[in-house]
Image: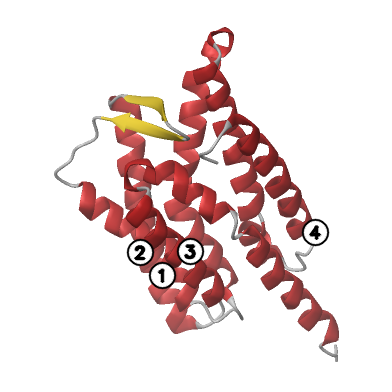
Amino acid sequence: MCFSTEASFAGGLIIAGIGIATIRRVHKPSQIIFASIPLFFGLQQIAEGFLWLSLQHPEFAALQKPATYVFLVMAEVFWPAMVPLAVLWMEKNKKKRKILWVMLAMGISVSLYFTVCLLALSVKPEIMGYHIEYVDNFPKSVHLVVFGIYLVTSIAPLFISTIKRTYVLGILMFVSCLVTIVFFTQYLTSVWCFFAATMSLVIYWILRDEKRKYKSTPNY
């Protein structure tokens, strides 16, 4: 969460709590990855809370590097593959699954790209006003292409899925990303992750309704 140490920790704990509640709504093994997304977001925001702490207080400077890389690995390495994998695992429609396999392959390619960048190149977090900017020397020539694929793999699977109401999550993800690009371009990694984390309640809602539907279906 990009606004302060307190906001990051408080938001992270609240979102993690939603994540635990969401996981408790799981009634099929195929839902586990999707249900774990809010918990993932919560832990990610807590990691950025420790980063805020390390940047603002010299006595916590030792936390800066691990907190930076925990946050970025979750945001840039796990996330592009996590969404298509979560949706693919739940999907039963064969035609949709074929498309989702392509989405997953694209997501994994982005994950591998960021893995190499994080291992070989430098990243320096800086507080700029009420935001954290991650200053890196990643290749600029492919930035737009990689970012475009990142967006597609993070949002498109939610519209492809036949699971009820995942498209609502997709719309909210798209709108939050658009707002971030327009108003917070320089702090995109940090700010969009905050807005994406607010989508956790929608994931809870989707799985809650799926569980109710499951319980109401007669077993013969």
Q: CA distance from mark 1 to mark 4?
A: 26 Å
> Which of the two labelled residues, at mark 1 and mark 4, occupies the earlier sequence position?
4
Image coordinates of residue 27 in percent, x first then y, are: 77, 68
In the picture of the structure, the residue carrying the numbered disc 4 is 24
Label 4 amino acid?
A: Arg
Determine crowd level at label 2: few under 14, some 14-19, many 20+ residues with C-alpha closer than 10 A: some
Q: CA distance from mark 4 to mark 3?
A: 23 Å
In the picture of the structure, the residue carrying the numbered disc 2 is 152
Q: Is residue 77 visible?
A: no
In the picture of the structure, the residue carrying the numbered disc 1 is 156
Q: What residue is rendered at 37% in x and 32% in y?
A: 134
Q: Could you tell me which secondary element the residue under label 2 belongs to?
A: helix
Q: Could you tell me which secondary element the residue under label 4 belongs to?
A: loop
Label 1 amino acid?
A: Ala
Label 3 amino acid?
A: Met
Which of the numbered marks, if any, corresponds to residue 173? 3
Looking at the image, residue 155 lies above or below residue 210: above
Image coordinates of residue 213 in percent, x first then y, are: 77, 83
